Image: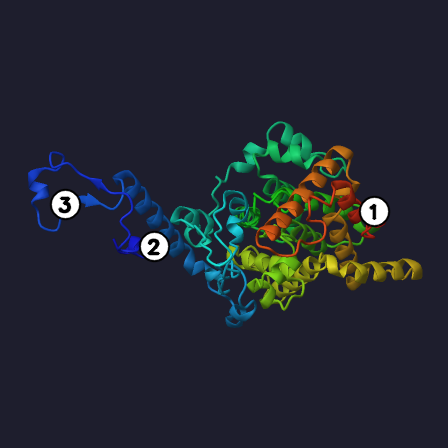
Amino acid sequence: MPVLERYFHSAELGRRWTAPEAVLPSSLSSRPGCQQGPLPWDLPEMIRMVKLVWKSKSELQATKPRGILENEDASHSFPGDVRLRGQTGVPAERRGSYPFIDFRLLNNTTHSGEIGTKKKVKRLLSFQRYFHASRLLRGIIPQAPLHLLDEDYLGQARHMLSKVGTWDFDIFLFDRLTNGNSLVTLLCHLFNSHGLIHHFKLDMVTLHRFLVMVQEDYHGHNPYHNAVHAADVTQAMHCYLKEPKLASFLTPLDIMLGLLAAAAHDVDHPGVNQPFLIKTNHHLANLYQNMSVLENHHWRSTIGMLRESRLLAHLPKEMTQDIEQQLGSLILATDINRQNEFLTRLKAHLHNKDLRLENVQDRHFMLQIALKCADICNPCRIWEMSKQWSERVCEEFYRQGDLEQKFELEISPLCNQQKDSIPSIQIGELKSGFCFVLFF
């Protein structure tokens, strides 16, 4: 079994199943070349693994011809980042360079004690976990059926989408009604309602596949930075794009950029902040030289998925390159360390009254401001939702603090649940300086 030998060491015996002699026909058991005695796994499990590996291999072979790059230098655009973009020529990203932490298991290891002592650490990543976590074996084929949207649009979910432009839109309820597919369902609806599918001649199946990839790259175990947060930010962005002072100047490209950036602005977020990555010497911090580490990773992961899905492959090369760069500018603007930079610039524009939205640079700046506001707007939501978001963000902070304490690291600000209360954390967010912009 050469395919299985790639993933299983020949010395690994695992669980053994011994076939009784009565089960094997004499003619079969006596044939040369037929294995007798113990098998490496239970027979049903063995068959299941063969089928899974073979299916994954077939999917990769089937998708490989479609993933050839149009330009040969594109493979050097994002060195060292983006997980397995083999079809697009983007190098695979190494995971968990800090020996104590594998972020895919961060949620489990914090509570189950799988991470060992400080001197000797073992990441107990079984083949089954790796199989489900790795895009190499999953390929790029959506795991959900293509009729998913038809099911999601029924009943209350469809009714909620009719009010998607209202500020009291309940994203938590919408996520439940769509069976955890709020981001995919919301984006498909908004792309259609804004006429983007028709304008850019997007293939609906390819769009759905790309959105599934984005949604699946969010870590569901993160209390705050997950796909529901991305859907919430996207819905808020939609509200801002509808504001009359801005909407009359926006082009279809502006709208698509705003929605895509909102949907993917935190993709593959590990549930810890930039200082944590820096002080644990994570490879992403080294790769981006401690500058906008997470935001650079979110952007380049997004570009990798765009190329892998080939959503924009039919557009002119110059246009796709411009889209990639503008997406980067928007996502990088969400770096909390650049808050004063954008706030100072916005105040200057408001004071001088020199914003000219017919100018593409000024429109792009307003898209950056809109995305920054959408990203941190949850304190300005109605109380029922604001309270849930407050609890979620504090829980994520506290988890990081517990992890830092476990590894004898200095606990980051707002991450000490013994000292930092939920009200104090929320007051800090409200003082960020952008809340006054939300209803400008």
Binning the other alpha carbons within 10 Å of mark 3 as few (below 14), some (14 to 19) or many (20 upward) gives: some
Above or below, 408 against 27 in this view is: below
**N-term mark: 3 or 1:** 3
Q: Give the residue number, with chain letter if any, for mark 2.
A: 7
How far from the left and from the top, in percent, is residue 295? 65, 59
Residue kind at label 2, given as amino acid type: Tyr
Verify CB contact (< 8 Å) between mark 2 and mark 1.
no
Binning the other alpha carbons within 10 Å of mark 1 as few (below 14), some (14 to 19) or many (20 upward) gives: few
- Residue 429 or 384: which is nearer the viewer? 429
**N-term mark: 2 or 3:** 2
How far from the left and from the top, in percent, is residue 89? 48, 65
Verify CB contact (< 8 Å) between mark 2 and mark 3.
no
Q: Which mark is residue 36?
A: 3
**Which residue is most to the top?**
155
SS under mark 2: loop
Q: Give the residue number, with chain letter if any, for mark 1.
A: 244
